[in-house]
Image: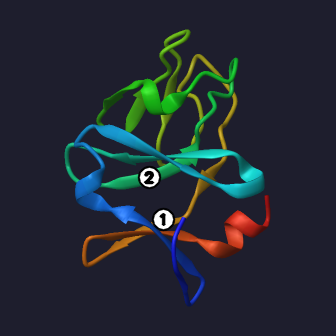
Amino acid sequence: MHSQTSGWVYVTKIDEIPIAGARVVTGGKAGPIAIFRTADDSIFAVLDKCPHKGGPLSQGIVNGHAVTCPLHAWNINLSDGCAIAPDSGCARSYSIRCESGDVLLSVAELASD
């Protein structure tokens, strides 16, 4: 991760994340964090581990505001990191925002892991 300003840390440019894809950044103690960009240019950040068996969510298929884990096809809601029924469990989600094309993560949430 890069520079930090007023509680947020710069991680990448939105254009560096493929549409309906992800980019992984190091979350320090948290572990790898997957930054997702959906087809409608929404962005989300979740721990890059499926709550089922730890599969790499960043390698899954993004559909709407969900991602399908590549290991066992669990669907994870990107807004909160929780599995979509009938599956259950949650991956840690993080506050994220985009300003002038810069993608920023909450420093406070990274520090709390």
Q: Secondary structure at mark 1?
A: strand
Q: Which residue is mark 1?
A: 96
Q: Are marks 2 and 1 in contact (CB under 8 Å)?
A: yes
* Residue in view at x 25 percent, y 43 percent: 18
Q: Residue furthest bottom?
A: 6
Using the numbered discs, state the Cα–Cα distance from disc 2 to disc 1 in whole angstroms. 6 Å
Percent position of residue 14, x then y = 28, 60
* Residue in view at x 58 percent, y 29 percent: 83
Residue 80 visible in rendering? no
Decide: is 31 above or below 41: above
Q: Secondary structure at mark 2?
A: strand
* Residue in view at x 56 percent, y 90 percent: 6
* Front residue (pair 106, 87): 106
Mark 2 neighbour density, 10 Å: few (under 14) some (14–19) many (20 or more): many
Look at label 1 and name its amino acid.
Ile
Decide: is 87 above or below 43: above
Mark 1 neighbour density, 10 Å: few (under 14) some (14–19) many (20 or more): some
Asked which colour scheme the image uses, the reply is rainbow
Percent position of residue 68, x then y = 44, 22
Instruction: Return the disc, 2 or 1, that comes first in the chain's sequence.
Output: 2
Q: Is residue 48 left or right of residue 31?
A: left
Image quarter (top left, top right, bottom left or bottom right) of the C terminus: bottom right
* Residue 44 circle label: 2
The quadrant holding residue 111 is bottom right
Decide: is 71 above or below 25: above
Look at label 2 and name its amino acid.
Phe
